[in-house]
Amino acid sequence: MDLILGRFADAEIGNLSDAELGELERLLEESDPDLYAAITGDKVLPAEVSGALFARIRAFPIADKDA
C-alpha cells in the first residue's frame, strides 16, 4: 500500500483540498489488506472512506509506464 498511496501522494498531495486530506487520513486508518482489497475491487469499504478521493486513487496509474 505504501507504493500505491505513496505514488498518489507524491503526485497529488499539493492539489488536495483540506477535505480531501481528511479523507486521505481516514483511508490511511484502514488496514493495508482491506485497503488493497478495495483498490483491486475485491472488497467494498465503508461509505465514509470510499468517496471521490478513493475513486481517484483507484484510477491513478500504479506503475510508471516509462520505467
Image (cartoon, helix red, strand yellow):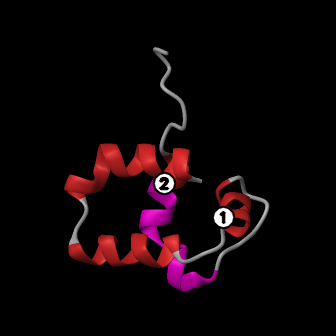
- Picture coordinates of residue 30, whole percent (x, y): 60, 75
**In the displayed structure image, the side of residue 27 where residue 22 appears, left or right:** left
- Picture coordinates of residue 50, whole percent (x, y): 55, 73
Answer few, some or many: residues within 10 Å of disc 1's Cα (few below 14, many 20 plus, some between 14 and 19): few
Residue at 48% in and 25% down: 64
Q: Are marks 1 and 2 in contact (CB under 8 Å)?
A: no
| Frontmost residue, 29 versus 59 | 29
| Residue numbers of the magenta segment | 46-56
- Decide whether the magenta segment is chiefly helix, strand or loop: helix
| Residue 65 located within the stretch drawn in magenta | no
Q: Residue furthest right?
A: 42
- Picture coordinates of residue 19, whole percent (x, y): 28, 78
> What's the amino acid at mark 2?
Ile
| Residue 55 located within the stretch drawn in magenta | yes
Q: Secondary structure at mark 1?
A: helix
Q: Quadrant of residue 39?
A: bottom right
Marks 1 and 2, how far apart at CA: 14 Å
Q: Secondary structure at mark 2?
A: helix
**Residue position for label 1:** 32
Q: Quadrant of residue 25?
A: bottom left
Residue at 41% in and 48% down: 8
> What's the amino acid at mark 1?
Asp
Residue at 57% in and 83% down: 47
**In the displayed structure image, the side of residue 52 where residue 63 appears, left or right:** right
Q: Nearer the viewer, mark 1 or mark 2?
A: 1
- Picture coordinates of residue 26, whole percent (x, y): 47, 79
**Residue position for label 2:** 57
